[in-house]
Image: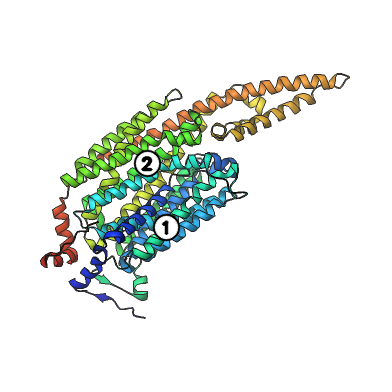
Amino acid sequence: MNTQPITSPSSAQQAAAQESGRRLRGFALFSVLAALMLTLLLEALDQTIVGTALPRIIGVLQGFDRYTWAVTAYTLASTTMIPIVGKLSDQFGRKWFLICGAIIFLLGSALAGTSQSMDQLIAFRALQGLGAGIGIALVFTVVGDIFSPAERPKWQGIFGVVYGFSNLVGPFLGGWLTDHGPLLGNLVTNATRWRWVFYINLPVGVIALAALLIYLPANLSARSQRYSGWSAVRRIDFPGAVLAAAATISLLLGLTWGGDQTYAWNSPQIIGTLVAAGILYVLFVVVERFVVEPILPLDLFRNQVFAAAALLSLLQLMVLVGLVIYLPFFLQGVLGVTATYAGAVITPLTVSTVVGAALAGIAVTRFKRYQLVTIVGALIMTAGVFLLTRMTISTSLLEAAIFMVIAGIGLGTFFSVLTVAAQNALPRTQLGVGTGAVRYLGQLGAVLGVAIVGTVVNQSLSSDIASRLPANAVKQLTPAGVKFATDPQALVNSTYRDTVVHTAQGFAVRNAVARVPAGPQHDQIAAGVAAQVMQQVQHLLNQVFEALRLSFAVAIQHGFITVLIFCGAAILVAFFLKDVPMVQATREGNEETGVEKGQEEQGEDVNVTP
């Protein structure tokens, strides 16, 4: 096996590799782009599709205390894969990694649909995430390979719209499938229609997989230096990948467990976990300084445009996930709409995000500048999120829709700007790792967003509900009964709510009837006492449920205030997204690789014409 580096390929060799993508035309180009869009759509969709389905899933599988992990496991697994596969694709090519990622994702989808417990669901969601991480990293990289820097704004904008649309249509599709997914005998019953949230990936994913196998060129990327065999494997930054994953997990565990009913923020477990996360991140930075080809080259962040784009990607996903996870819970738990209607009401956020992305793409393509578009988008996003923080139990659905439209337009601008800004600021030899780094930080933002906002919501709910409960609630329902009745499932799951009522009434009736003295009219008196007690318990539980609804509204409001802080940070960072004219980006890319430069000297057209 050859383990020697293959150095200094000729300009003609690099051009040949690059032209394998450039020659995609007609039906082949259409097939590749369609397959890439479908791949991205499904893998981004699964970041949010479970949001509106979770209440129903929890009703069947139980485990409300772990419900955020159904989302976190997916984003955490995908986050760990993105930077690794970015480097691997630079060395070994994109095609087969992309195909393997699609297969892993489809396998995880099939298994997640068969889950019989929350722990199984979390494990299979993690498997989905591993495959999705490969796809999310490489789809945007392949688009950068196929198109020239001057054309990337349009096409990356289109794929950014697909990504944003997928994230935002997820709650609607998840709600619709949860309520109306077709029955499949014992496999999918009326109570488990939510399984279609995962099964829907299979037919669409197989079509995309077939198109990639047939039409995607195997040699899209060109490097100034290639290694083969074990020499190439040894250059992969496995220590950095392990440290990044361990640090992310430690940070997430600290933020998720901190302050809940298991651990206080000042407990040794939480302090130790957060300190470990800090140490691991420091070690990660140290390792990245010394390895030959780091998965996250620190010198990338010396480029101001790339650094700003990467940080904005992190903040954008923190905002997006914070909204799409808790908006359905607000609509269902506070305003009382069904899962399907909750998804439908989020449609304005979806549509406005697409509109915002399209407008931003047009603006960047025409004026070939990023900064002003990004700043305006951040301001609009912040205004929309501020309005969402003002929602209460009396907010109308129309008002909520208007607020979401404003936030969505601002969010959409980021989908068209960030990836193309980062790619055009870097030489082609760093296209894979640079794109992977931006997507990595974006996925890390999704993990952090769920953890931070979830922690704020849980803490707020725990503290607020205690002050709203009726004075006699603990005495009549017992502490365990109050805990059972104040689980948010009581607001979003009618089956769970009925179980709470029946359990509490049964407990109270048994205690009351046991105190009825024996005698000839015992049964008659006991029946009267039972009816009276059941009525009293129902009245008390109605008060408890209303207190829970009020506290849930306050808790989610506090969560949205946290999201607003993320928006403020995005405004500040947007001012550092220095404009890089497209002509300059194209010239710098040519000088680095020699591909376009050699072609320009021969008078060749490097643009892709669909």
Q: Residue at x 33, y 43 (%)?
A: 316
Amino acid type, residue under disc 1 in the picture: Ile
Q: Is residue 586 above or below residue 531?
A: below
Q: Is residue 168 above or below residue 508?
A: below
Q: Is residue 474 above or below residue 437?
A: above
Give the residue at the far bottom of this rendering.
Answer: 1
Q: Quadrant of residue 2?
A: bottom left
Label 1 SS:
helix
Looking at the image, residue 551 sits to the left or right of residue 244; the answer is right
Residue 270 disc label: none
Q: Residue at x 39, y 34 (%)?
A: 560
Q: Residue at x 20, y 45 (%)?
A: 364
What x and y, as percent, mark residue 332? 49, 32
Q: Residue at x 44, y 22 (%)?
A: 394
Whether label 2 touches label 1, CB < 8 Å: no
Label 2 SS:
helix
Give the residue at the far front of this rendering.
Answer: 27
Residue that carries the numbered disc 2 in the rendered image: 320
Q: Nearer the viewer, mark 2 or mark 1?
A: 1
Q: Nearest the camera: 25 or 135?
A: 25
Residue that carries the numbered disc 1 in the rendered image: 207
